[in-house]
Image (cartoon, grey):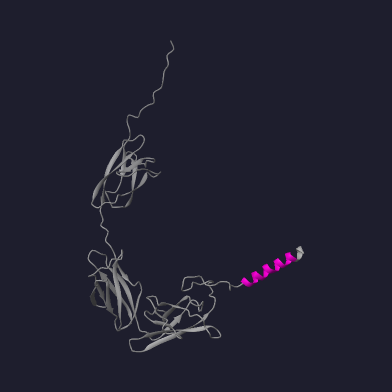
Amino acid sequence: MEVITASIPSVDTNPKTLDIDAPSSVESGDIFTVIITDQETGSPIQYASVILAGSGAITTDVNGEATLTASEVTTDLDYTISASADGYNQKTTTIRVINVPVVPMLFISPSTIVVEINTTFQITISSETGLHLTGAKIEFNNNFYTILLDGQVTLSAPLSEGDYLLIASYSGYISASKNVKVIKIEDIKAFADETTVEENTKFSVKVETDDGDPIINAKVYLEEDPSVEAYTDEYGNAWLTAPEGKDSDDGSFNVVVEKGTTFGETVSDSLTFKIGSSAGGSGQSVDGNPSDDNSAPGFEIILLFLSLILVFFIRKKS
């Protein structure tokens, strides 16, 4: 009788031991690295499986490293890290995930504050969600203020030019600070990116000091119709609507800018604009309809070219 023999795979009855090198604690949501090594040789173990409780398995790289992310917690908690690899006993360790309360921040607006000496100005204090914080404290130029119900407070600018620090604080929030530039207005300049505008469209005017600082609350108006007016914002910009039906030969109109100073004087400047097609192409009219663009350069040339082609084919057919 023939005897059949079969080989039985050998089983490693003496698995080796691995080590887990991990931080003892991390903060909530932190990304951290663990290293898996051979306990005896200290060599990194590649392809080891590492699991942080509540998360999926991560495989170690050639350096024996695995990158894990701590869970978001609202109180300090201990989590188990387990590691296993072929030929090694499974091993576990514990890591503490620490809750770090998120402290909200204060926000000061406007974002840029440039004011004239010996004037008053308003600021608003709010949370990052836009909540107005009644009772917030303001320190400015050695004076202290309290925010009112609408989140605003009126401050007094110093009598001297310079940069002044404004600090806002509120219980439970990270304090905020902002530089306030205090200037003396002796002259103003008006600028515009485009001085050729289409009738009945919006255009902007920028007002600055000789040093390039934006002028806030400067009056900007049409010389021929002062009722068409606007006031500059925190960046020194104001928007007006171009007039329509100009009768002058060149279709021009003037824009005047004025600003009263703390000395009872009024400083001013003016800009001349012209009604026509703007360099940017078709504009946006005040009523929201695109302006007529049939006058765009080359339109008549295209029509003439098409007419010539049509005449050529008619003659050739005849």
Horizontal arrangement in the rendering, residue 257 relative to residue 159 (left or right): right
Horizontal arrangement in the rendering, residue 20 relative to residue 223 (left or right): left
Horizontal arrangement in the rendering, residue 57 relative to residue 243 (left or right): left
Residue sitting at x 34%, y 45%: 35
Residue sitting at x 30%, y 74%: 123
Q: Nearer the viewer, residue 165 or 301?
A: 301
Number of numbered labels in the structure image: 0
Residue sitting at x 32%, y 74%: 179
Residue 188 quadrant = bottom left
Q: Nearer the viewer, residue 145 or 282?
A: 282
Horizontal arrangement in the rendering, residue 158 relative to residue 244 (left or right): left
Note whether residue 211 is visible: no
Screen quadrant of the C terminus = bottom right
- Residue 110, percent across and down? 34, 72
Note whether residue 177 is visible: yes
- Residue 120, percent across and down? 29, 80
Screen quadrant of the N terminus = top left
Q: Is residue 309 magenta?
A: yes
- Residue 53, percent across and down? 29, 43
Where is 180 relative to 96, above or below?
Answer: below
Q: Residue furthest front?
A: 318
Where is 219 relative to 311, above or below?
Answer: below
Residue sitting at x 76%, y 64%: 316
- Residue 249, percent across and down? 56, 85
Secondary structure that dominates the magenta span: helix
Magenta extent = 299-314
Q: Nearer the viewer, residue 82 or 193?
A: 193
Q: Is residue 68 magenta?
A: no
